[in-house]
């Protein structure tokens, strides 16, 4: 197994990355988050107990791993502290967590502006998680953001006061919203600064040293490749780069230092929020997937849109990530189906497409072209090896490999650590 491994989502997020990260993290010396923020939601089940993580890397559940929140993350102090307290209340030590001094900080005006902007979009809303992610990245790109290092500097109070005054103008004059109470926000965030200080480091140095000294380092993707700001289904995307390229910038390391890139994909497709989804099932089949797969958001509780496996998406995301292996998750969810469809191409206006178009109008016009595989109609949740898998399930996995052009290295048949087939 490679020493440096990245785990990325091959679809629209919620692929079950947390489980594979947790699985790989049991042997890892370091786990690194490099983009996104508290919009992420990973659930990991250990010995029957479910842990929901948002901002803290999943490696926190392995007492030996160092956990890094990299410079590319937009850091939400109250979300982080609440998560830390809750983990500790559950008996998790959570004592090796470090936050990059270069990470940008999410403030209450980012969350408020996220909500006001979504309301203003009306029917064209993106369906964001309302965690202030987009507005925080907007400030970063505009070069007016406040970073963790600023939060710990003498001029923090004045800087934040200036930002609140500027944002209140927008909140009130553009959106007709209620202005924020600057004194209250400043007092709250000054208190957070005191609590966060012990966790803050130049984390790029730590990651670089870990790699150079031959440690096992895991890069934990949040969201999914189809939510990438540049390469995803724009504008129904998040504001960061959840593709493998995002790790170099977001962790502050050289490109090319990651040896293995594992793409996590569900055995079917889900999506939260708006935007076209070619293989979406709006019938009882979709409901069955949702119920069997417990497809409700960890962060928002929203029911997820469900559909058949979209091979056009997976082939595309394998290409843009340079994926070296796939982890096929939640295969057991398909146990009850008589027949299972895999989409290997799209069709629009009589034209066959085997790539994902940039224009969402074009995507909306696409119909899936399916290959149908016979269902295995058996409970596979206790299967632990490839040979024990029913022939139909093996055929399904082989078809995924053929469509995506990438080997399936892990198969997951349930939420538990032990319900993982390694090939
Ligand atoms: P934002 O990241 O809150 O700005 O939301 C932008 C889009 O990304 C919305 O469609 C969200 O539902 C989606 N999104 C953000 N984070 C996740 C995630 O962790 N899983 C799945 N979808 C996500």
Image (cartoon, helix red, strand yellow):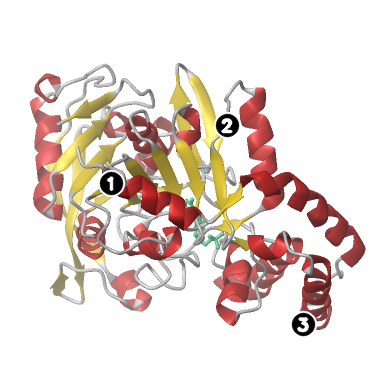
Report the Cα–Cα distance between label 3 and label 2.
Answer: 42 Å
Q: Give the foreground label among 3 and 2.
A: 2
Please give the name of the residue rendered at 53% of the width and 56% of the height, measured from the top-left corner: 202
Q: Position of residue 402 (x, y in %)?
A: 8, 50
Element type where label 1 sits in the image: strand
Q: Is residue 38 visible?
A: no
Left/right placement of residue 387 relative to residue 378 reads left
Q: Give the foreground label among 3 and 1.
A: 1
Left/right placement of residue 326 relative to residue 145 reads left
Q: Which residue is mark 3?
A: 174
Left/right placement of residue 111 relative to residue 257 reads right
Q: Position of residue 304 (x, y in %)?
A: 47, 47
Instruction: State which quadrant residue 141 falls in.
Output: bottom right
Please give the name of the residue rendered at 15% of the width and 67% of the height, measured from the top-left corner: 354
Report the Cα–Cα distance between label 3 and label 1.
Answer: 47 Å
Please give the name of the residue rendered at 35% of the width and 35% of the height, measured from the top-left corner: 28
Does 380 sit above or below residue 5?
A: above
Q: Choose the circle earlier in sequence order: 3 or 1.
A: 1
Mark identifier at residue 94: 2
Does 143 sit above or below residue 315?
A: below
Does 17 sit above or below residue 8?
A: above
Mark identifier at residue 4: 1
Report the Cα–Cα distance between label 1 and label 2.
Answer: 22 Å
Residue density around tag 2, few if under 14, some if 14–19, many if 20 or more, within 10 Å: many
């Amino acid at each position: 197994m490679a020493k440096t491994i990245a785990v990325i989502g091959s679809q629209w997020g919620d692929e079950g990355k947390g489980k594979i990260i947790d699985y790989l993290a049991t042997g890892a010396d370091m786990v690194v988050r490099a983009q996104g923020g508290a919009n992420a939601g990973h659930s990991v089940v250990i010995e029957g107990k479910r842990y929901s993580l948002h901002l803290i890397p999943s490696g926190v559940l392995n007492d030996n791993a160092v956990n890094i929140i990299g410079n590319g993350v937009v850091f939400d102090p109250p979300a982080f502290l609440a998560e830390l307290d809750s983990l500790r209340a559950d008996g998790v030590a959570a004592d090796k967590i470090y936050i990059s001094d270069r990470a940008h900080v999410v403030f209450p005006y980012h969350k408020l502006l996220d909500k006001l902007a979504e309301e203003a979009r009306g029917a064209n809303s993106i369906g964001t998680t309302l965690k202030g992610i987009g507005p925080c990245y907007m400030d970063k790109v505009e070069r007016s953001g406040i970073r963790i290092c600023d939060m710990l500097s003498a001029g923090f109070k004045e800087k934040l006061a200036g930002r609140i005054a500027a944002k209140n103008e927008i909140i009130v004059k553009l959106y007709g919203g209620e202005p924020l109470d600057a004194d209250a926000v400043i007092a709250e965030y000054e208190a957070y600064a005191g609590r966060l200080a012990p966790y803050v480091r130049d984390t790029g140095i730590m990651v670089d040293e870990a790699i150079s000294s031959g440690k096992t380092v895991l890069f934990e993707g949040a969201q999914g490749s189809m939510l990438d700001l540049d390469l995803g289904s724009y504008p129904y995307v998040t504001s960061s780069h959840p593709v493998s390229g995002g790790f170099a910038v977001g962790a502050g390391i050289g490109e090319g230092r990651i040896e293995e890139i594992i793409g996590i994909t569900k055995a079917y497709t889900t999506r939260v929020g708006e935007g076209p989804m070619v293989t979406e099932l709006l019938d009882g089949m979709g409901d069955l997937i949702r119920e069997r797969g417990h497809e409700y958001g960890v962060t928002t509780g929203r029911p997820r849109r469900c559909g058949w496996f979209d091979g056009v998406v997976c082939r595309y995301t394998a290409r843009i990530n340079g994926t070296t292996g796939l982890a096929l998750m939640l295969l057991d969810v398909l146990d009850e189906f008589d027949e299972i469809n895999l989409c290997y191409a799209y069709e629009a206006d009589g034209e066959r497409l085997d790539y994902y178009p940039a224009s969402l109008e074009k995507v909306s016009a696409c119909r899936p072209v399916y290959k149908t595989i016979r269902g295995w109609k058996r409970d596979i949740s206790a299967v632990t090896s490839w040979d024990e898998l029913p022939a139909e399930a093996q055929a399904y996995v082989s078809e995924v490999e053929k469509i995506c052009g990438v080997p399936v290295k892990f198969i997951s048949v349930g939420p538990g650590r032990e319900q993982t087939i390694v090939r």
